[in-house]
Image: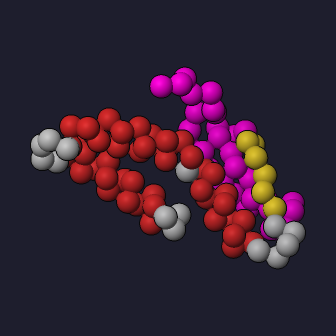
Amino acid sequence: MAESKFTPGPWGFQKSEAYKNTWRITADGQRLASLDSDDGEPAQTQANAELMADAPRILEVLRTLHDFALPLRDRGLAAESEQAFADARALLEKHGG
C-alpha cells in the first residue's frame, strides 16, 4: 500500500466565527481547509465538512475491512471483524452512504 501523506488524525470541524456559512477542517490546532456556502446551502456545506473531518477514520476503517475481507470468505466472523463492520456501518449511516 502507498505510504500515507496526509496530516495525521483525528481531524475535526467547526463553524467559523468570522465568516457566515463557513466551516473549517482542523487537525491538532491547524486549519487544513475551509468550506463555505455562499449559494445558500449551509446544511450541505456542514455535511461536506463532517465527511472531510472523518477522512482519516474512514481510511482506517477501510484498511481494517480490507484486512478482514479474504479470511472472512472461508470462516466465521471474529470479534475484531464484527467491530470493523460496525464501524464501517456507523460511518456510512453518519454520512448517508
- What's drawn in magenta, residue-wise? 1-30
**Residue 18 seen by the camera:** yes
Asked whether residue 63 is drawn in magenta, I would say: no
Q: Main secondary structure of the magenta part?
A: loop
Residue 38 x, y percent position in the rendering: 87, 69
Looking at this rendering, what residue extends furthest in the bottom direction? 40
**Residue 78 seen by the camera:** no
Q: Which of 63 and 45 is in front in this view?
A: 63
Q: Which of 16 and 6 is in front in this view?
A: 6
Asked whether residue 16 is drawn in magenta, I would say: yes
User: What residue is at 32 percent from the left and 35 percent from the top?
Assistant: 67
Q: Nearer the viewer, residue 67 or 24?
A: 67
The image quadrant of residue 35 is: bottom right
Residue 96 x, y percent position in the rendering: 51, 68
User: What residue is at 55 percent from the left and 23 percent from the top?
Assistant: 3
Q: In this view, does 88 lie to the left or right of 37?
A: left
Residue 16 x, y percent position in the rendering: 79, 59
User: What residue is at 87 percent from the left and 60 percent from the top?
Assistant: 18
The colour scheme of the drawn protein is secondary structure
